[in-house]
Amino acid sequence: MAGQFIVGVANVIALLLGFVFLVRFWGLSKLKRAASMGFPKENCVNKNGNGEGESESEGVGTAEIIIVGAGVAGAALAYSLGKDGRRVRVIERDLNAPNRIAGEALMPGGYLKLIELGLEDCLDEIDAQRFLGYTLNKDGKEALISFPLEKIHSHVVGRTFHNGRFVQTLRKKVASLHNVSLEQGTVISLLEENGIVKGVHYKDKSGQLLTAYAPLTIVCDGCFSNLRHSLCHSKVDIPSYFVGFILTNCKLPKEKYGVFILADPSPILFYPISSTEIRCLVDVPSQNLPSVSNGEMAHYLKTLVAPKVLPELYNSFISAIEKKDNIRIMPNKIMAGAPHLTPGAFLIGDAFNMRHAITGGGMTVALSDVVILRDLLRPLHDLSDASAICKYLESFYTLRKPMSSTINTLANVLHKVFSAPSDPAMENLQQTLLGYLKLGGVFSSGVSALLSGLCPRPLSLAFHFIVMAIYGVGQLLLPFPSPKRLLDGAKLLWVASSVLLPIIHSEGVRQMFFPLTVPAYYRTPSKGKKI
Ligand SMILES: Cc1cc2nc3c(=O)[nH]c(=O)nc-3n(C[C@H](O)[C@H](O)[C@H](O)COP(=O)(O)OP(=O)(O)OC[C@H]3O[C@@H](n4cnc5c(N)ncnc54)[C@H](O)[C@@H]3O)c2cc1C
């Protein structure tokens, strides 16, 4: 009897101890989880006694990767790395929906990348519009640029939308992962020790200065990046600005197609961003950007631009200009992607590489880069050897070239050609392009495949440029080659090559056309040190 009593008491004690242990363990893991999710602050910040000055973040002691910026690139990357089981900490300056005129048209090639990342449902409930191509208009003549979607699944098309709505749905997906924390804070600088980036200094929502640590920091702080200067060669060119506003109560001439007007002094674009709104972007050369505040911009738009707008859009165009606070301006920046390899840090998105926004290729390049980086990081279990990781990730810069250099080159070349019509040689180039697209068949579908991100092949780009040049010179020489026509043909070739070659040079001829000759292309995680 006494023995049974002792065994019974022992069982009760064991159960109680077990219960206490479970509660403690559960409580701890919950705390850790709360800290890693980024809220509440008290749970993840280790204050330095008096609560002033700089503090160290504790909850992120476990983060493997810090991502700076939750825009298109940062949010998509955080989600894809989180899905791979990485412990990721995202620090974003402003978690409210962005309100901007950039990043509203996603090319079909970019949509394919969204699918690869498992993020295509982010476009489902934001009133995104199907986008099949553009009508290209010049002096009353029209050519159709249709994305070549015939051989692809019917739901793969381009999409146009409000950028803020898209970014918020990406962020929602990020916040749904328990191993990814998303918090509001502004990163001030990278934390560098002996040439290795160990994390970031940032200010949280309340303005407190904090430090977060991780073996790898990926900077995605966009086109106005203040962190890129030590991570890449940041030579930024601003050839023009986009002046944007929203039109209502009108329809574009062809459903699901944007309108691209080749006008003097520079192009005008229209595309729907919801079922009731049409975005207009007017490209204005940097050297004569009128001021919005003193009414010069409205005057410029009314007198110089409105006469070139299609008649069916004219009234809405004028009403949109007159609407208060409707006009927004953003610089069109160009920056070649030239990294300074830095152990512990990595740069992607617009912070790393920008092309003219005229072809709407930025998000496609950013999402393609996210796919490449995710795939490169996938086999790495341990990120602690920053130098080995840095060396291994060098392959990224060559692997990204097919998509990035194709889209970058096309965008920068087209902008140059479209924005100098007063130059007769450039005018000839515009006519050549229009005529080439009107040929239809492989000619127009080839160019639109390049534009849409469905054909990320620099060689195909070079092929079309060469055939276009032959076509253009041929047109100039017909019906018979007089000396003046020969001269015009030579000028056309000269101007075309002086536009194209510097752009190709900045992309890197070897990486663009001969990637297999770049040693970094072959780097694998198994080579060199164990990582
Ligand atoms: C006028 C214009 C029109 C464009 N139109 C198109 C288009 O139609 N289609 C297209 O594909 N591309 C377009 N682009 C390009 C496209 O917007 C970019 O390529 C894309 O947004 C790049 O994504 P990102 O994540 O690098 O930058 P962003 O989307 O800009 O994200 C950067 C994020 O970092 C955050 N951040 C910045 N600094 C800090 C900091 N210090 N700390 C923490 N967070 C920070 C920002 O708040 C932001 O959320 C356009 C660009 C311009 C300029």
Image: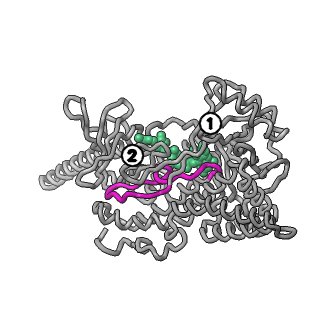
Dot 1: what SS? helix
- Magenta span of residues: 336-360
Circle count: 2
Q: Is residue 292 one of those drawn in magenta?
A: no
Q: Which residue is mark 2?
A: 227
* Residue 297 sits in quarter: top right
* Residue in the picture at 35% in, 74% down: 526
Label number found at residue 41: none
Label whose residue precedes the other's in the sequence (1 or 2): 2
* Residue 283 sits in quarter: top right
Q: Which residue is mark 1?
A: 288
Where residue 130 appears, x then y in whole percent? 72, 51
Dot 2: what SS? loop
Instruction: Locate residue 195 relative to residue 495 in the image: left or right.
Output: left
**Is the residue 474 above or below the residue 304 in the image?**
below
Instruction: Locate residue 110 relative to residue 59 in the image: left or right.
Output: right
Q: Residues within 10 Å of mark 2 (few under 14, many from 20)?
A: some
Circle 2: residue type:
Leu
Instruction: Locate residue 463 relative to residue 12 in the image: left or right.
Output: right
Between 524 and 1, the one nearer to me in the picture: 524
Where residue 522 appears, x then y in whole percent? 42, 75
Where residue 96 appears, x then y in whole percent? 51, 35
Instruction: Locate residue 370 relative to residue 187 in the image: left or right.
Output: right
Distance from the alpha carbon under mark 1 to that under mark 2: 30 Å
Respond yes or no on whether mark 2 lies under 8 Å from ligand 1.
yes
Q: Is residue 348 one of those drawn in magenta?
A: yes
* Residue in the picture at 58% in, 59% down: 113
Q: Are marks 1 and 2 in contact (CB under 8 Å)?
A: no
Tell me the chief SS of the magenta region. loop
Q: In the displayed image of the protein, which residue is found farthest to the left?
A: 2
Where residue 13 appears, x then y in whole percent? 19, 48
